[in-house]
Image (cartoon, rainbow, N blue to C red):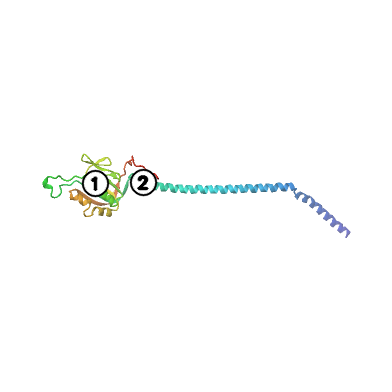
């Protein structure tokens, strides 16, 4: 028994002595713990700064994407407005259904005037201008006379017996082509006692034919305004 107790005591002492160096090795000094805590705080602060920078970059990217989308939409809207303005100014060739009106000098004087030496009637500038106004009133969207594009500012006048349209002499017969609703345009010209009937009553030849497709040229350039200016707010 004494021998057994001696052996057990020896083993216990040996085990305790073997644990002492391990405990000493695992125990960290207090200054080392403070350094590690400071390092953890620094790493945490750096992580927070990086997260804030990432969030700011994401917001900036979203702002750029929004601005790009808005700019793209604005560019498309401006392109549509520009195309519409070019149509209004006659700077773009157009095509569509409409009517073709051929206005030509009369072959003989009006009835009842042949015996008094009256010559067959000639087309005058006012005749063409009145016909153009009738077509605009009936809903024409685009018009041309002998391939000369007509606008609201296009003048029709007589110079030395010739009809001048947009600065160019246009010979008869006069082919007036108007794009719009063919039925509405034809009905506007067929009004009883209207302008076309008046032209025929003086002996002029007037033919009106609906057309499924007309092609009108563009004007070379737009006329510059010399006196008109955009109105400023007061």
**Left or right position of 109 against 155:** left
Q: Is 233 displayed left or right of 24 in the figure?
A: left
Q: Is residue 232 left or right of residue 141?
A: right
Q: Which residue is mark 1?
A: 128
Q: In percent of the image, x 85 and y 56: which residue is there?
A: 9
At numbered mark 2, what does the secondary structure look like: helix, strand or loop? helix
* Viewer-side residue, 67 vs 213: 67
228 displayed left or right of 105: right
Where does the C terminus fall, quadrant-wise? top left
Q: CA distance from mark 1 to mark 2?
A: 26 Å
Q: How many marks?
A: 2
| Contact, mark 1 vs mark 2 (Cβ under 8 Å) | no
Q: Which mark is residue 85?
A: 2
Q: 228 or 158, which lies in front?
A: 228
Q: Where is residue 81 drawn, in percent x and y?
A: 38, 47
Q: Residue furthest right?
A: 2
Residue 136 coordinates in the image, percent (x, y): 28, 50
Query: Which quarter of the figure is the N terminus placed in?
Result: bottom right
First in sequence, mark 1 or 2: give its number: 2
Which residue appears at 12% of the width and 47% of the height?
Answer: 114
Residue found 68% across the figure and 47% down from its top: 39
Q: Give the class, few, some or many, for how many residues have Cα within 10 Å of label 2's Cα (few <14, many ≥20).
A: few
Residue 220 locus on image (x, y percent): 32, 41
Tell me the SS state at disc 1: helix
Q: Residue furthest bottom?
A: 1
Find residue 90 and report its horizontal and vertical position in percent: 32, 45
Neighbor class of circle 1 (other Cα within 10 Å; few <14, some 14-19, many 20+) is some
The answer to whether any part of residue 212 appears in the image is: no
Q: Is residue 135 visible?
A: yes
């Amino acid at each position: 028994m004494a021998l057994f107790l001696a052996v057990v005591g020896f083993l216990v002492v040996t085990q305790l002595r073997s644990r002492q160096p391990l405990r000493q090795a695992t125990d960290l000094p207090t200054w080392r713990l403070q350094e590690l805590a400071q390092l953890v705080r620094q790493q945490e602060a750096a992580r927070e700064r990086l997260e804030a920078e990432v969030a700011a970059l994401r917001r900036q990217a979203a702002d750029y994407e929004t601005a790009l989308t808005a700019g793209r939409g604005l560019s498309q809207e401006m392109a549509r407005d520009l195309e519409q303005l070019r149509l209004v100014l006659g700077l773009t060739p157009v095509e569509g259904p409409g009517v073709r009106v051929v206005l030509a000098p009369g072959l003989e004087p009006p009835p009842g005037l042949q015996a008094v030496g009256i010559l067959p009637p000639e087309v005058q500038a006012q005749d063409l201008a009145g016909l153009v106004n009738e077509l605009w009133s009936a809903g024409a969207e685009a018009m041309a006379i002998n391939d000369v594009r007509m606008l609201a500012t296009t003048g029709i006048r007589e110079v030395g017996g010739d009809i001048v349209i947009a600065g160019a002499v246009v010979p008869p017969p006069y082919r007036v082509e108007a794009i719009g609703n063919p039925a509405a345009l034809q009905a506007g010209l067929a009004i009883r006692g209207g302008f076309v009937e008046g032209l025929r009553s003086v002996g002029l030849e007037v033919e009106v034919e609906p057309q499924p497709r007309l092609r009108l040229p563009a004007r070379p350039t737009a006329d510059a305004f010399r006196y008109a200016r955009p109105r400023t707010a007061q």
